[in-house]
Every structure is written in C-alpha cells, then in structure tokens.
Amino acid sequence: MGVLTRDVILAELDTGRVRIDPFDASQVGVASIDLTLGSEIREIVNDDSAIVVTEDADYRDHTRMLALDRPYRLDPGVTIHGITAEHVTLPDDLCGFLEGRSRFARLGLMIHVTSALVQPGVSNRQVLEMSNVSSRALEIVAGVRLCQLVLMRTEGRAVYRGRFQDQREI
C-alpha cells in the first residue's frame, strides 16, 4: 500500500474512479483531499443514565440532530458527530483515512477519536467524531475544511457492505 500524491489523486478524480461531490480542485493538497463540515451535527443527549455498550448499541438512540446554521459551542470533554458536505466515492482498490487538520488539533479539536478508515468501494458522506480535548470551549462552524482524506491503494479489491455503507446523514 502507498499514499496517493496530488498528481495521482487528480488523475483518479479526472478518470472518475474517485468522486468527490461537491468538489473544488483547491481541496487537493500534496497527499490528501480537504473535506468540509456540512450543515448538521448530532449531539449526545446527556440524561445522566449510562449507555450500555453492546453490539446492538446504536448511537441514534442516544443523540439528537441539530442544524448547524450558527456556530455550535463544543465544551471541553464533549463529543459530537459531524458529517462532511462532500459525498465521497472510492473504487474497490482504494481506501482512505480521515485525519484532522493540525491547525484545529492545536486548538484541541480532535476530528476522529476512532474509526478513521474509509473502506474501499464506499459511496457516502463521512461522519466525523469530533471531540474537544482543550480546556476552553470551541465554536464549530459549518463549511470549514476540518479534515483531510488520505488515499491509499489496497492489496486486492474489496467493497464495504457493512452497517454504514449508505451513510447520507448522521
């Protein structure tokens, strides 16, 4: 496996093997594609009861959807779910990793606590598990390029058919 660089990413986009919608060529960096935060978030409802973590646990049972039509105050120690504005489609021989951008990590914003892998063959928007690990509140704003997608070639071909294969909302 190897990380795709700008020229290879652009070639994959030009041939349509990789699709990003909407797409702006300025989003492609040296070895990644910037993705922006969309217009909604999901926050965990704090009702002081414990969430039982089992295979059947569903985040939707413990969260509520909010429009991100104004800045959202993310307090220290709190995690929310965002979703990218971009719909990402990968072929069966490419996978990706979502990484936070250092400019925001240095303020204490973690974009992925876990599950940063973007599986081969996906065609969906990417959910961002966003946590504030700083000592100060952060205001989260829609439309900001919060993360980057790093693409890699796989050894073999596969298409993800799991629980989140048709992820269009959070």
Image (tube, helix red, strand yellow):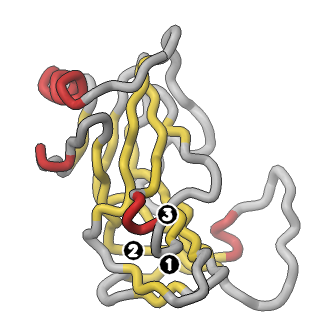
Question: Looking at the picture, which amino acid does disc 1 mark?
Answer: Met
Is 62 rendered above or below residue 112? below
What label does residue 40 carry, if any? 2
**Cβ–Cβ under 8 Å for marks 3 and 1:** yes
Write the residue at 50% across / 71% down: 109
Name the quadrant containing residue 76: bottom right
Location of residue 47 in the rendering, given as x and y in whole percent from the top left corner? 77, 90
Question: Looking at the picture, which amino acid does disc 3 mark?
Answer: Ile
**Cβ–Cβ under 8 Å for marks 2 and 1:** yes
**Cβ–Cβ under 8 Å for marks 2 and 3:** yes
**Residue wearing tag 3:** 170
Nearest the camera: 97 or 54?
A: 97
**Residue wearing tag 1:** 65
Neighbour class for label 1 at 10 Å: few (<14), some, many (≥20)? some
Location of residue 91 in the rendering, given as x and y in whole percent from the top left corner? 36, 23
Is 162 rendered above or below residue 113? above
Report how far apart the C-alphas of labels 3 and 1 lie in the structure: 8 Å
Q: Which residue is at the far front?
A: 106
Neighbour class for label 3 at 10 Å: few (<14), some, many (≥20)? many
Circle 3: element type? loop
Name the quadrant containing residue 100: bottom left
Neighbour class for label 2 at 10 Å: few (<14), some, many (≥20)? many
Location of residue 70 in the rendering, given as x and y in whole percent from the top left corner? 31, 89
